[in-house]
Image (tube, rainbow, N blue to C red):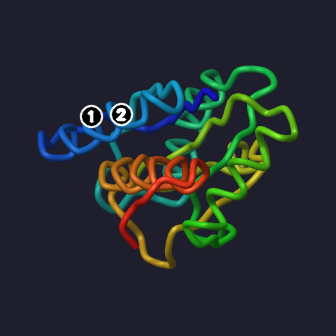
Amino acid sequence: MKISIACVGKVKEKFYRDAVSEYEKRLSRYCKVEFLEVADEKTPDGASAALEEQIMEKEAGRLLEKIREGAFVCTLEIGGKRLTSEGFARWMEGLTVKGKSHIVFIIGGSLGLHESVRRRADLALSFSDMTFPHQLMRVVLVEQIYRAFRIIHGEPYHK
């Protein structure tokens, strides 16, 4: 299985980069993981709704260019479907049974995801009602993907 994580912006803090790198290394025995970073747009303080819409639309265009034909697209959104770790593992395993070998997870920028990206998604997934920094969300996502593969393979992992 190939997992792509399309993200707006770069990871600036070393501790986030180190955490992501550690899970990338752990995941290498289960799947191929790639990060597809797109540039984020600067959002001025007090930006109008119209300007925020334009910013999200520009970021959306960059994200959508990264999605390959045939990939299963999963956006991370507060309003998305909630799964337990075991449910997430079953969902990932079910995709492979259905012949989906490439999953693209999309993490938006500080303003969220434009409607065009939401429309392209095959699934919107929520990790919480809370808002997380996109850099931290990368860590949470790769940890949950790693946990899912451990569950799928019947390997121990702390609860």
Residue 28 rendering spot, x and y as whole percentages: 42, 28
Residue shown at 71%/50% (left/top)? 118
Foreground of the two, 111 or 98 = 98
Q: Amino acid at mark 2?
A: Glu
SS under mark 2: helix
| Residue 57 image label | none
**Pointers 1 and 2 in contact (C-beta within 8 Å):** yes
Which residue is the extreme one toward the right?
A: 98
Q: Is residue 75 left or right of residue 51?
A: right
- Neighbourhood count class around disc 1 (C-alpha, 10 Å): few under 14, some 14–19, many 20 upward: some
Residue 33 rendering spot, x and y as whole percentages: 48, 28
Q: Quadrant of the N terminus?
A: top right
Q: Is residue 83 left or right of residue 94?
A: left
Residue shown at 31%/55% (left/top)? 136
- Neighbourhood count class around disc 2 (C-alpha, 10 Å): few under 14, some 14–19, many 20 upward: many
Q: Which residue is mark 2?
A: 24
Residue shown at 55%/33% (left/top)? 58
Q: Which residue is mark 1?
A: 21
Q: Amino acid at mark 1?
A: Ser
Foreground of the two, 115 or 12 = 12
SS under mark 1: helix
Residue 60, quarter of the rendered image: top right
Q: Quadrant of the C terminus?
A: bottom left
Which residue is the extreme one toward the left?
A: 14
Q: Is residue 158 above or below residue 124?
A: below
Give the Cα distance between marks 1 and 2.
5 Å
Residue shown at 45%/47% (left/top)? 146
Foreground of the two, 102 or 48 = 102
Residue 39 rendering spot, x and y as whole percentages: 40, 28
Q: Is residue 141 left or right of residue 31?
A: left
Residue 87 rendering spot, x and y as whole percentages: 66, 67
